[in-house]
Image (cartoon, grey):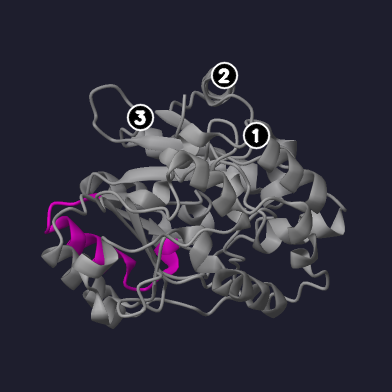
Amino acid sequence: MKSLQALKHALADAGHQVDVLEHEKDFPLFRDKLEPIGLFPLKPLVSQIFQVNVGKMCNQVCKHCHVDAGPDRKEIMTRETMQLCLDVLKKNESFTTVDLTGGAPELNPDFRWFVEEIKKMNRHIIVRCNLTIILANKRFNDLPDFFKHHAIEVVSSLPSYTKDRTDRQRGDGVFEDSIKALQMLNEVGYAKEGSGLILNLVYNPAGAFLPPSQPALEKEYKEALLKDFGIVFNNLFAITNMPISRYLDYLLVSGNYVSYMEKLIAAYNPTAATNVMCRNTISVGWDGFLYDCDFNQMLDLKLSCTESTHLSNYNASLIDKRDIVVNQHCYGCTAGAGSSCGGVVAE
């Protein structure tokens, strides 16, 4: 299968010494889970979310990061490629939300220009802010005000409401800076009743296990953060770690790869498969190439419609009819209540 070969190539490029694909014979193919419920080939619905990775540079090096982002990454989207994004948005009004990711998207030198141009088209903007970037340098201290001015929805990772667990996953000092940044966002009105300013948090498990109940965890977070730090937020998204990039490294080194895959497969939920985010999302790489989702992007699994795999040759009619590329990591999005960039996808 072409996609399996692409996955093998991506894993080899990432320096993995263990051939993950040797275990394929032990696991049912993800496509075989879709066929009995009439979902293979998996087809898109209406494209509503235009998710753009504006660069892999980040001020943090998180252990679970599927982008493998960090300070040493030089891949940055140029203004020319951003303009191609804007051109696609102008021609495709079905995209009501633009989701900006990184790395730390704010480190792209044209980040603010890009946001301002998108807002001119009256699109809802999500920025996946790691929080610590707000305190990383004086030039970022005004980000809460910038976000407020453009009514940006802020989505931020916070692995725990305790210092120890957060710093273990994201680095020393991250929890303290994250708390300060959340307080700064609250100060300008984020998550305050009637403000219309949305602040959501993201939880990723720290080990080789699935996330707990999202509603229950959200309740814990809200109570703890309010009691200890006076912080409020809107929603908590519990996201399953995908067996790719740094998290895959962890699984292999710790000897947990097989058992983790078995957990994902055992927890497969057909309802979650119906609602996977790749059905209403187009993912754009920093260099303008197109993918079904952010995870496929990191494995270099481009759109299946070979005539339209880049912003420069974006063809909505072809893209809307494409077969979505699926692979074994897709079990992560369909385990339990499911997982997406917006949290669970099934009751």
Helix, strand or loop at mark 2: helix
Look at the numbered disc 3 and give the secondary structure of its residue. loop
The spot of residue 17 in percent (x, y) is: 83, 73
Query: Is 116 included in the stretch rendered in magenta?
Result: yes
Q: State how far apart marks 1 and 3 are (Cα).
A: 33 Å
**Residue 20 vs residue 328: left or right?**
right
N-terminal-most mark, 1 or 3: 3
Asked whether 58 or 50 is in front, the reply is 50
Q: Are marks 1 and 2 in contact (CB under 8 Å)?
A: no
- Horizontal arrangement in the rendering, residue 56 relative to residue 65 (left or right): left
**Figure check: 103 above or below 28:** below
The range drawn in magenta is 105-124
- Which comes before the other along the chain, label 2 or label 3? 3
Labelled pair 1, 3 in contact (Cβ < 8 Å): no
**Left or right position of 246 against 95:** right
In this rendering, the answer to whether 336 lies above or below 107 is above
* Residue 4 inside the magenta-drawn segment: no
Along the viewing direction, whichever of 45 and 171 lies nearer the viewer: 45
> Which residue does the numbered mark 3 point to in the structure image?
191
Residue kind at label 3, given as amino acid type: Ala
Residue at the (73%, 39%) spot, across then down:
263
What secondary structure predominates along the stretch shown in magenta?
helix
- Judging by the rendered image, the residue that carries numbered circle 1 is 267
Q: How far apart are marks 1 and 2 (CA)?
A: 19 Å
Image location of residue 184, percent across then percent down: 42, 39
**Residue 18, located in which quarter of the rendered image?**
bottom right
Query: Which picture quadrant has residue 140?
Result: bottom left
Three-letter amino acid code at the position of disc 2: Ala
Seen at 62% across and 56% down, the residue is 328
Question: Residue 152: x and y, percent?
Answer: 28, 46
**Which residue is label 2 attached to?**
216
